[in-house]
Image (cartoon, helix red, strand yellow):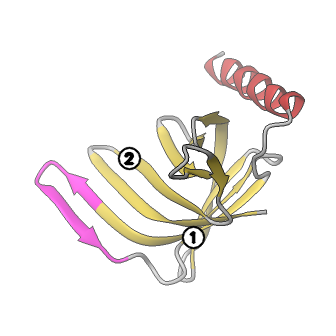
Amino acid sequence: MRGRLRMVRFLLVVSAIFASGASFAEELKCLVERKTICGPSGCKISAPLPGERIIVSVTERTYRICDNTNGCQKLELDAAYPSGIFWVYEFNGFNVLKAQTQEVTDNLDLKPLARWPFMEFRHSFLTAILSWGECSPN
């Protein structure tokens, strides 16, 4: 039942986005540049794996975490929605990628960005993985 409610919510949000004409990417390709892993004993900086990247497809409802060694782990994209100058992508339960799509100029105008800086939060048991980098919207 919970999965069905999530799917209905996801479809309603995406339908509203298409109807409003709001600009967003149907697919994102994000390169992980920095990473921190936190657990009960504290946090440590960790180098991204070679070729570590995230591929988000709104149309396929997928969130893939990939690297050159392990290939891709395919997860379900639960929601995609705007939040101010950001787009938020929720995946696989309580995990999120937040991408900045615009910047505020000195005149307080909004300027679209060609490349989107992002922050990702994932968790597993009592460990949190925080990643930062840049996305290319397609």
Q: Which of 86 and 102 is in front in this view?
A: 102
Query: Which residue is depicted at the point 57% across and 82% down?
Result: 68
Where residue 16 sits: x, y (%)?
81, 25
Which comes sooner in the sequence, label 2 or label 1?
1
Where residue 97 sits: x, y (%)?
53, 48
Does the magenta stretch mainly form a helix, a strand or a loop? strand
Mark drawn on residue 123: 2
Figure disc tally: 2
Where residue 63 sits: x, y (%)?
65, 53
Q: Which of 27 and 125 is in front in this view?
A: 27
Q: State the residue position of label 1.
A: 53
Q: Nearer the viewer, residue 118 or 43?
A: 118
**Disc 1 residue crowd, few under 14, some 14–19, many 20+, Cα 10 Å:** many
Is 39 one of the magenta-colored residues? yes
Q: Residue furthest left?
A: 41
**SS for dot 2:** strand
Where residue 106 sits: x, y (%)?
50, 52
The quarter of the picture where residue 14 lies is: top right
Quadrant of the snapshot with the C terminus? bottom right
Q: Residue furthest front?
A: 107
User: In the rendered image of this protein, does residue 6 appear above or below residue 76?
Assistant: above
Amino acid found under the numbered disc labelled 1: Arg
How far apart are the alpha carbons under marks 2 and 1?
Answer: 17 Å
The boundaries of the magenta stretch are 37-47
The quarter of the picture where residue 88 lies is: top right
Amino acid found under the numbered disc labelled 2: His
Quadrant of the snapshot with the N terminus? top right
